[in-house]
Amino acid sequence: MVVEPVPDAPAAVVDLPDERALVLADVHAGIEAGLRREGVEVPSQADDRRAAIEALLDRTTPDRVVIVGDLGHTIGSPERAERAEILDIVETVTDRVPLTLLKGNHDGEIESVFGDREAVTITGGDGIRLGDVGFAHGHTWPAPDVLRAETICIGHEHPVVRLEDDVGGARKERVWLRGRLDPTPFEDHFGDECPPIDGELVVCPAFNDLSGGTWINVAGQSFLSPFLPGGLVSGDAYLLNGTRLGPYERV
């Protein structure tokens, strides 16, 4: 696999031509403040998230970290606790390696927090291509150059499954989705300007388990991305521990 999930973690490593990248999606720093505004009291897990990222850096020894959108949670300008957590994460990463952030729909004004740092690259949500791997957040159509890649990684969906045991108990589990990229939705969108498409699509689980998700096996749920589910052909779901659940439509 070009994109290799880190066992038991919502993260992956990608071997690029000249470097090894640690890939995270949907960190949603400061989410607890947003939940409080909605009337849900949740203790801050900012220290745990930073420690988890630090542990992944130790474990995978990357040359770069790529965050596939939604580092922050507030759609506008981050404030107070969220700003502090974003800065803490950025400093934790850039003390060791460069950071590339693809802006997600929750990262609208994130440049105001750390956009002037030399070790940071911020790109649009339509993505960036690094070698044979394209990265895009997933809330909008990927750039044509991203679609030409052999493998495309997106976030945004936070895919999760509902698993039930023999006595009726249920739990939520984050999953990876992987499958062939179907060119049809992109041909419909781009028309004659659509690039040749013949790659794999990887939908990353959310790093932040508090951020909700798209239930892939619960009736009445729908995808968020404009090119899903149509753009994912014969997609399989995988738990964070690597267990293959089979075709995601039939989990």
Image (tube, rainbow, N blue to C red):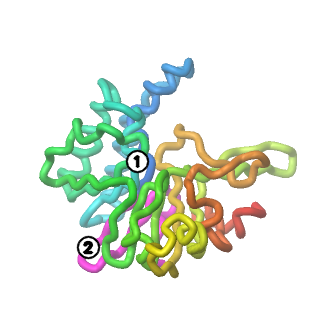
Amino acid identity at mark 1: Gly
Residue neighbourhood size for the residue with mark 1, other residues' Cα within 10 Å, grouped as few (<14), some (14–19), many (≥20): many
Residue 245 location in percent, x, y? 70, 65
Query: Which element is circle 1 on?
Result: loop
Q: Residue at x 68, y 49 (%)?
A: 222
Asked if the residue at tag 2 contacts the one at tag 1, i.e. Cβ–Cβ closer than 8 Å, the answer is: no
Gap between marks 1 and 2, in whole Å?
24 Å
For marks 1 and 2, the one nearer the N-term is 2
Q: Which residue is drawn at 31% across and 26% down?
A: 79
Q: Name the residue rendered at 21%, 44% in the picture.
A: 91
Q: Which mark is residue 104?
A: 1
Taking the image as drawn, is residue 31 in sight?
A: yes
Three-letter amino acid code of the residue under disc 2: Glu
* Residues rendered magenta in the picture: 1-23
Q: Does the magenta stretch include residue 172?
A: no
Q: Residues within 10 Å of mark 2 (few under 14, many from 20)?
A: few
- Is 89 positioned to the left or the right of 175 in the image? left
- For this orientation, the residue located farthest to the front is 192
At a point 23% along the width and 37% down the height, the residue shown is: 113
Residue 2 in view of the camera: no
Residue picked out by circle 2:
19
| Residue 12 part of the magenta segment | yes
